[in-house]
Structures are given as structure tokens and as C-alpha cells.
Image (spheres, rainbow, N blue to C red):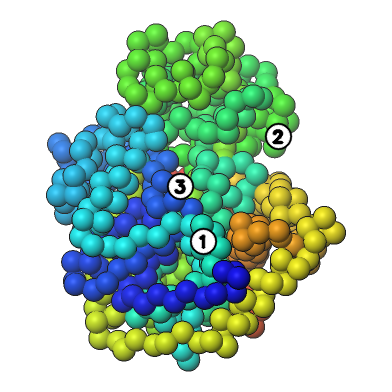
Amino acid sequence: MSWKTWRTVDTDVLIIGSGGAGLRAAIEARRYGVRVLVIDKVVIGMNSNTRFSGGGLKAALPGILEDRYTTIFSTPEEHFYQALVHGEFMNDQELIETLAIEAPARVLELQEFGVEHFEALYYHVHYPHGTGLVEPLMAHARALGCTMRPGITPTDLLLEGDRVVGCIGFDVHTSRPLAISARAVILATGGAGEIYERNDTTAGTTGDGLLLAFKAGAEFRDMEIVQFEPYVQAEPGLPQMDRHECEAEFFGILRNAHGEEFLQNYLPPRQNRVDSFEKQFGIPLTDIRERVARAMLSEVHEGRGDHGAVLFDLTGVPADKWSADIASEYTRAVLMRGFDPAEKPLHVLPGAICTLGGIAISADCRTTVPGLFAAGEVAGGVHGAARLGGDALVETLVFGARAGKYAAVYAAETKGSATSQSRQDAVMGEWDSVLERPPAESPTTDSVKTLLKRLMWTHAGPLRDEKGLRKALGQLDDLDEQAGRLGARSLRGIRAAYEARSMLLVARMVLMSALARTESRGAHYRLDHPYRDDVAWLGNIFLAPDGHRLSLSVRPTRFPRHRPSLVSKFGVEVRS
């Protein structure tokens, strides 16, 4: 039967994931003349966070990039320094400097790939705005001769000694197992926002690449840092989505259950009058959203929430603002689905938007495992403790291109390796064991995921403390045991089971790291340690596989260019 019939494929560079980083890596690798294969567990490009992003790009291109909703810096040096300030100096300075220096060229070359309106996708491209970036990158990669295969779920990386030489997975469309030999592998699978009950990420953002890297022995960093988008809808009957760069929302007012406007208590306004967010508070929302998210959750935590959320008063938004841009029109017509914002406030609450920690990489996107590269949200170290708006998409372009280049060079200099039949048989046995368990007699994948997401939102969201983090770690052990007993009726069921395992691993990484960091820095806020501690915590937390467990270490943060400033952008005391 086809399920037991292996198909083997050979390529030079294998790219797992087809968002912005994966597609840009494919283009760059192909430019070096190597064979490139891009695989995705669902459809190519279309289910990525890149496609569903706000569509804003940040680079030192004043007068070219639109500064309507984010700050566009005058020089790469200014971009570099302000990203350090925003990242609370937790960034790997070589990585963030590389992003700032290379961003202008990577953005401008988008014209060569057929990307129209790169200067402001959110203002010209209908939702989802990132389609204006993804579709041209897909077309260009295909035109260069890159092979793209949807529906491929990799469950394990192939190793020869300590070197990655491909992957093993299955094709849900043909119901056949697949072994791919590759001289270099790039992980571009995105982050793990799905570990939270409230999120604004795609359903497939389950940390799959992090599980693959863990099994291969890679190192991770800064996993406690998770970014939350403030204005995610929490109104019953409406989708749990935010409005991205929407002109109208910037004129809305956040209120608590008592009807009190509260944001000025957390962000002292520069002008005491109703106006756009940037004019009220002196900074674009996309460059301070972590602090806004914390303010919203603080109101709920202190008993001033309304049905577990806060109220977003849009009744005073000028009528012309609802037609000022595509995002505003789409919000009112589609996302609100008949809800009349002129009549009553909308319930909103933050949701996870991206994980800023990830696989540890060097500036050439090498991981700690030979032959394995990583780029985009799956990698850590670029943004530090918080990320500026627009830097996420630019990261996919800069480090996607770097990963493609250095993986191609590595592949050209490395001999190929045959797939291991014994390893294939072992992995097949693992899949069979899942299929042999009757789902009705074991925990369901959906139930494990649901319990995990609720656990993480309750105890490891924007507000954290030791008691909650320890409680979550204890309950995670039980969920791990349940995940080990998951059954499935099909290959799609096996894929869901592996997603659950990925989510549980990432959750453990976040909890362990958040518990260890006894301070508040950027997007990481501890209720029991509400200050930035530069005496004890000018360091980064690294995690590494230790058998089937994780070992944690803290390493001093390197400051080759700039030392930390003594004032936090996030409104907390700095102990220095």
C-alpha cells in the first residue's frame, strides 16, 4: 500500500516553510545555482504570518517608505540604535545591526521581484495586506526554477553524525512517506503564537520548526519574549483578529468597565485632546504596542475589566476616517460583521502576535547544528526584549536572503548523503504507533491544544508571576503525558499530534525562561518583579536539549557597540 511505500527526493538546499523568510531564502539560494526545494505543511505561502501581516516595512528610506503608522529612521545607524533601545539591549547587536544596514537594499530590490506598493502595502493592498509581498516572491522563486511542494509535513530532520542532511516526513496529498536528502536545510517555519488562547496568528503557527531543531540538538535563546498585539477583538460573535494599520482605530479611546479613559495613566500624553494615537502620545502605536497591551491587561487584572476585556470606544471616530484607507473600510465592513461602532464600544483584549525568541543563529543564519540554518520568526536574537513595528517583515527579507546565500555556499561545498533506512523505519514506527491508538480511547489533539492555550494565556501572557509560572509548569507535565497517548485516524491526524507536541515544547521553553528572568524587560513583565534589573539581568537565557529535557543557562549579553541606556522605554524603574 502507498502508506508504506517511501518516496525519496534529493536536493541541494531544502527550505521548510514558505512565508517571507522561506521564499526570500529560496530566491537567494537559487541565484547561486543550486537546486532548491521549498516544502510547507499546507499551501505554499498562503497560510503564513507574512501574508496575514499588517504589511508595514521599516528601513532607513525616508521619503520612500510611508511613515503614516510607524517611524522611518533617517539612517541605518539610527534604526540600529532605536531597535536596541526598544529591545531593552537584549538584542544580539551583530544581528540587529545587520538588519538595519541591509534593510534599505532588501526593501528596494522588492521592485525587481514585482512587489508593487512596497512603500505601504497596508495602504494599497486589500486584506490580507501581506499578499502583496508573498505572491510576487512566490512567482519570482518559481520563475527562477525553485521547486515547491505543498502538503509536506516534516517530523524529523535527518542526521549524519551531528550534521543535518535532510528530513523525513509525509505527503498528506498522496498519503506517502517522504525522505528528502539535502546538503543544507533552512528552517523558516515561523513562530508559535498558537500556544496562546488569544492570538492573532495563523492556525498553523505551532512552533513546528522549533521541535525539529530541538530533536536535532540545536540551541535556543530568549524564549520568554513573546509580543502581544493590543487591539485584538474580544466581542462575542466577532473574529479574534486585530485591525492592523487601520486609520480609524487610531482615533478610538480605550476605556475600562467604569467608562474611564485609562491609557494616559500608563502613557502620559503630550497633548490633552482627542486626536490620533501618535499625536496624543508622541509615538506610533506599532512602536509601543507592548506597553499598551500591558496597560489593558493591568486594568483587567486590577478588577476594572468588562467581561474579562476592556472597551474600545470608537463612537467618536470622525466619519471620514472609516473610508480613509483599505484597512478601515475592511474593518467596518468585514471584521466587525454588522457591529455598529457608532452605537457602543467594542470589547478588545491583547493577543499573541509573535514569538521573539527562537533558534540561536549567527549573522550568516547558521544554527549550532552543522548543515542547519534558520531565518525569520523561528530564529531568536534579532529583536531582543521587544520589536519595532515593521521590523518583522524586514527581518524575513534580510535574514531570508542571508540564509539562502550561506546555505547555498555550504551546500556547494558539501557532499550529499543517502537517507538512512533504519531512521526511516524508526520514524515510520512512531507514526504507526499514533495510528494504532484509537482516538476515541485517548485524549484528543484538540483537547490537549485547548488546555495548553488556556494555560499559557492564564499564566504566561503579558502579565506573569512566579506562582502562575510554576503552576503552569506543573500542569504542563500532565499535558505532556496526554500528548504521548494521542491517537489519529489519518496522516492529517498525525500532523495535528506533532503540532501539539511542538506547542508543548515551546510552552515549556517560554515558561522555564520566564520563570528564570526575575525582572521586567520589554514584552516580558513580571508582576512580582516590576522593574528592569541591569545589575542582575544584563544577560540572555539559552536553552539546549539535554536528552529529552531542556537545560537552561544565562550568558552575559554582549555590548560591542552600545551600552544600555538608564531609562526604560516601557515605563519601569531601571536598577543599574
Camera-nearest residue between 450 and 43? 43
The amino acid on which the numbered mark 3 sits, given as a three-letter code, is: Asn
The amino acid on which the numbered mark 2 sits, given as a three-letter code, is: Glu
**Sequence-wise first label, 2 or 3:** 3
**Sequence-wise first label, 2 or 1:** 1
- Circle number at residue 174: 1
For the point 25% across and 46% down, the residue is 136
Residues tagged 3 and 1 counted as in contact (Cβ below 8 A): no
> Is residue 62 toward the left or the right of residue 211 in the image?
left
- Quadrant of the rendering where the N terminus is positioned: bottom right
Indicate whether 328 appears above or below 79.
above
- Circle 2 residue: 302
Q: What element carries label 2?
A: loop
Number of other residues with Cα within 10 Å of mark 3, as a class: few under 14, some 14 to 19, many 20 or more: some
In the picture, residue 373 is in which quadrant?
bottom left
Camera-nearest residue between 78 and 159? 159
> Is residue 537 toward the left or the right of residue 16 in the image?
right
Q: What element carries label 3?
A: loop
**Residue 189 in view, yes or no:** yes
**Residue 384 in view, yes or no:** no
> Is residue 49 toward the left or the right of residue 402 in the image?
right
- Circle 3 residue: 47
